[in-house]
């Protein structure tokens, strides 16, 4: 019953795929964190990003405490009616915020249904604040619903998607011509 409720929530939020996957098939790797550290301008600038997010070892330990996981794929975003998007940065902000809100709502729904261990991993870097509260040492302004992304927690999205039977690829350039060129993944753990 909960799986069908979550599936409905996923597709209602615009997901193109909702796939059950064994936590053992979720791949963690150290190179993923290196890509954050050496390749992402947000490294060390967000509380939900490395080095503040869980390490690959910590993530693997958490995954091993679960028996069920759901990998969600979003292609583009429901509001996008033109490709390429007029403003890719604004588009990514909207996409990330939408996916993170949707996966958190699924986590919360599962929790309230009695799955007290439910936990979600969001998408991309946190975009809730223009400037992260990290800089004023006051802590996150949204601690209840902020979640690390798969990548920031050391999850190899490409290998995990492949293990779940989902096709994905490297986005080669910023000239997005259709929704499938803008894949975004989120993960929900359930016990």
Image (tube, helix red, strand yellow):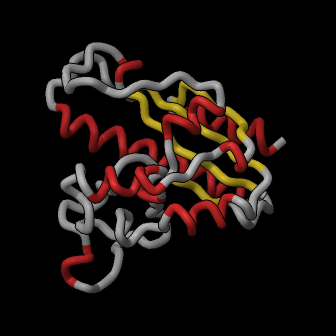
Q: Nearer the viewer, residue 75 or 31?
A: 31
Is residue 61 at all visible to an observer of this figure?
A: yes
Residue with the most extreme bottom position? 137
Q: Nearer the viewer, residue 176 or 25?
A: 25
Name the residue at 51% across, 61% down. Answer: 56
Where, quadrant-wise, is the C terminus in this rendering?
A: bottom right
For this view, does 161 lie left or right of residue 64? left
Q: Percent position (x, y) of residue 114?
A: 80, 62
Q: Percent position (x, y) of residue 82?
A: 25, 16
Q: Please give the count of numbered marks on the rendered protein.
A: 0
Name the residue at 18% across, 66% down. Answer: 131
Q: Is residue 88 above or below residue 116?
A: above
Where, quadrant-wise, is the N terminus in this rendering?
A: top right
For this view, does 35 lie left or right of residue 157? left
Residue with the most extreme right position? 1
Task: Specify the quadrant of the image occupied by residue 12.
Answer: top right
For this view, does 21 lie left or right of residue 169? right
Q: Nearer the viewer, residue 177 or 93?
A: 177
Is residue 79 at all visible to an observer of this figure?
A: no
Q: Percent position (x, y) of residue 160?
A: 58, 38
For this view, does 69 lie left or right of residue 41? right
Q: Nearer the viewer, residue 48 or 12?
A: 48
Q: Is residue 178 above or below residue 113?
A: above
Q: Is residue 83 above or below residue 63?
A: above
Q: Percent position (x, y) of residue 169?
A: 42, 25
Name the residue at 56% across, 66% down. Answer: 57
Name the residue at 29% across, 54% down. Answer: 127
């Amino acid at each position: 019953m909960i799986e069908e409720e979550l599936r409905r929530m996923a597709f209602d939020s615009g997901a193109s795929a909702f796939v059950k996957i064994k936590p053992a098939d979720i791949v963690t790797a150290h190179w993923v964190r290196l890509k954050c550290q050496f390749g992402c301008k947000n490294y060390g600038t967000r509380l939900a990003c490395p080095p503040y997010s869980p390490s690959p070892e910590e993530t693997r330990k958490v995954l091993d405490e679960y028996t069920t996981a759901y990998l969600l794929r979003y292609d583009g975003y429901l509001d996008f009616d033109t490709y390429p998007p007029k403003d890719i940065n604004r588009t990514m902000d909207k996409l990330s915020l939408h996916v993170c809100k949707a996966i958190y709502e699924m986590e919360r729904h599962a929790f309230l249904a009695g799955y007290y261990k439910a936990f979600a991993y969001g998408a991309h870097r946190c975009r809730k604040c223009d400037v992260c509260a990290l800089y004023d040492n006051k802590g996150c302004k949204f601690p209840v619903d902020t979640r690390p992304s798969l990548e920031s927690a050391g999850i190899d999205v490409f290998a995990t998607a492949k293990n779940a039977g989902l096709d994905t690829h490297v986005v080669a350039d910023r000239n997005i011509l259709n929704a499938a060129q803008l894949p975004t993944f989120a993960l929900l753990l359930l016990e």
